Image (cartoon, rainbow, N blue to C red):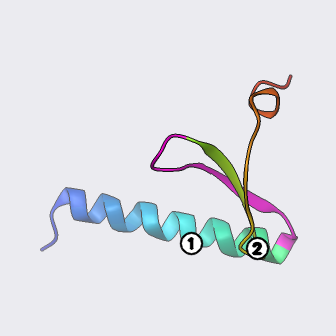
């Protein structure tokens, strides 16, 4: 039996995979924080664009 940490890691990975599929189908992108702390948009094409401070704090 997998432990809770492994179960949670798998669920997080599957959720991210599903988000990427949804973005591809809908012609949009996903947003996430990289391991070095930057917030980025990842498009279905594989292009990754770092978001600016202004984009992060829009109202």
Q: Pinpoint residue 16: horizontal percent, then vertical percent.
A: 55, 64
In which quadrant of the rendered image does the N terminus lie?
Answer: bottom left
Q: CA distance from mark 2 to mark 1?
A: 12 Å
* Element assignment for label 2: loop
- The residue where tag 2 is placed is 44
Q: Residues within 10 Å of mark 1 (few under 14, many from 20)?
A: few
Residue 53's image quarter? top right
Front residue of 20/4: it is 20
Residue at left offset 22%, top offset 57%: 5
Residue at left offset 77%, top offset 36%: 52
Q: Pinpoint residue 25: horizontal percent, then vertical percent.
A: 81, 77
In which quadrant of the rendered image does the C terminus lie?
Answer: top right
Q: Are marks 2 and 1 in contact (CB under 8 Å)?
A: no
Residue 47's image quarter? bottom right
Q: Magenta stretch?
A: 26-37
13 with respect to 55 (left or right): left
Q: Which mark is residue 32?
A: none
- The residue where tag 1 is placed is 17
Q: Pinpoint residue 35: horizontal percent, then vertical percent.
A: 45, 49
Earlier in the chain: of badge 2 and badge 1, it is 1
Front residue of 31/40: it is 40
Residue 30 belongs to magenta span = yes
33 with respect to 9 (left or right): right
Residue 35 belongs to magenta span = yes
Q: Nearer the viewer, mark 2 or mark 1?
A: 2
**Residue lying furthest left in this view?**
1
Q: Quick check: 31 above or below 37?
A: below
Total numbered labels placed on residues in the image: 2
């Amino acid at each position: 039996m997998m432990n809770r940490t492994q179960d949670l890691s798998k669920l997080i990975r599957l959720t991210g995979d599903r988000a990427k599929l949804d973005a591809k189908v809908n012609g949009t992108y996903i947003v996430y924080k990289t391991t070095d702390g930057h917030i980025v948009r990842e498009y279905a094409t594989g292009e990754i664009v770092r978001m600016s401070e202004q984009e992060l704090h829009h109202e």
